[in-house]
Image: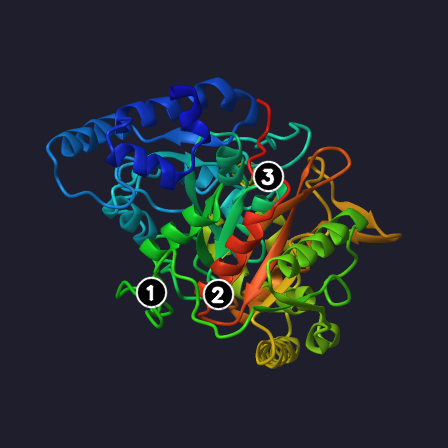
Amino acid sequence: MTTDLVRFDATQLAELIRSRAVSPVEVVQAHLDRIEAVDPKVNAIVSLAPDALAAAKAAEAAILAGEAVGPLHGVPFTVKDSIDTAGVLTQHGSPISKGRVPEADATSVARLKSAGGILLAKTNLPEFSYWIESDNLLSGRTNNPWNLERTPGGSSGGESAAIAAGMSPLGLGTDLAISVRGPAAQTGITSLKATHGRVPMTGIWPRAPRRFWHVGPMARSVRDVALAYSLMAGPDGADAFSSGIGAFQPGQPPQLARPLRVGWLIEPGFGPIDPEVAATVKAAAEALKSVGCVVQPVRIPALEQDFALDVFNRLHVMEMKPAFAQAVAGRNEAEIYLMARTMLGLPDTSMSDFIEAEQAAERLRDGFADYFARYDILLTPVQPIPAQKHGVSQFTINGQTVDATYLQGSTVPLNLTGLPGMSIRFGTSHDGMPIGVQLVATWLAENTLLHAASLLEGVSPVRGLHPNL
């Protein structure tokens, strides 16, 4: 069973540990062995938690003593290296933060630990969590375990690669515009960006623009994502955005007296979409129809009126540049990588453009409110293409050439509006790369969202597939 442990999801591992079929020490050691075997190829892990095995031994003793244990007791998890971990390096993917060791855990980490989870390792990211590929001057480039010539995405690409490769069953990433959902799609795993404020951002950098940042769970099953979310959600008294409205309990579907109403949308509103990605979204729509959902193609006029990516770019540059400037002040240029240089070189947004962008964001919120008055779920692409090769800055999609930021075209509307969204694999490209779809629900409707994702997971043609490393 030891070799199978790295393919079991966190929920099953927790069940095996509680029943004493395996020990926490066996589970943690199996994942450490997996890291040693495959991470030299993938480069997802930037540092190991020095006390992981000691924590596993303590968890084993608690089981043997018959103590009451939490839902993640003895289960290892990994954390993106922008999220603070007490006593464990948190370096933000930059030489500027090299050697930084926080004194306290981020709220999200502390809550997983309180449920019995064992911090195993920290995972790679782009410099300051700020790009769609996970590469930096401090810990280098992370590769996609499905094809080492491809990227696992960013900014939570190290986390997605670690989970896909069996180095971790469960992890935490952050999301400003795409960063838990895109990497999940590129590596064939599942992730959740909850309603903005549902999970506190305390202990995570950067915080600006805080109204767009999220922290979310990443895993290989919907039930793991649901469990982690249920443990992480709720106010912590420090992040003023965090709310406790509408508690979520995993495994409890929404109480509806009718079938789920699902609209699916590929274009327009998101930019060009690759035919294989479009076909996967259509297949997912048909699959939801087959399990009793009412499914229809839709259009959302607000997405066509205001291109969300353009709105986002006008807003976040003005808010993010000061944080970057402060972070690199007085530092040697050799310590500053691509995205910090790029951000600092961008022109400031004029106040009139900023105000117009704010109004456009309000129009988008109103457009989604109108949509969700009639539907429960929106089904879209996660990103317009499967995982791309490293370092590509332009793509030609359906005859249209776009820059790499267009990968965020269908995910960034959810950051602008605060809507919850999930990424779940549902297809495979002609060259063997995972293709994900995005499920979206109205604000605070994570229960409905996770229920829809569970239905889709149950009829997925690719469930259980993993890279051959």
Which residue position holds label 3?
187
* 128 lies left or right of 113: right
Q: Can the viewer see residue 271?
A: yes
Q: Is residue 80 visible?
A: no
Q: What is the C-alpha distance between the residues marked 3 and 2?
A: 25 Å
Mark 2 or 1, nearer chain start: 1
Q: What residue would you read off at disc 1?
A: 239
Residue 59: percent from the left, percent from the top?
20, 33
The picture places residue 378, in percent across and down from the top left corner, at 62, 66
Query: Which picture quadrant has residue 206?
Result: bottom left
Nearer-N-terminus badge (3/2): 3
Placement of the C terminus among the 4 image quadrants: top right
Q: CA distance from mark 1 to mark 3?
A: 31 Å
Residue at 70% across, 69% down: 296
The quarter of the displayed image where residue 464 is located: top right
- Looking at the rendered structure, the kind of residue marked 1 is Asp
Mark 2 or mark 1: which is in front?
Answer: 2
Which residue in the rendered view is the most extreme toward the right? 399
Question: Which of the 4 image quarters holds residue 293?
Answer: bottom right
Circle on res. 448: 2
Q: Is residue 3 above or below residue 429?
A: above
Q: Which part of the image, by quadrant, shows the N terminus?
A: top left
Left or right side of 327 for 346? right
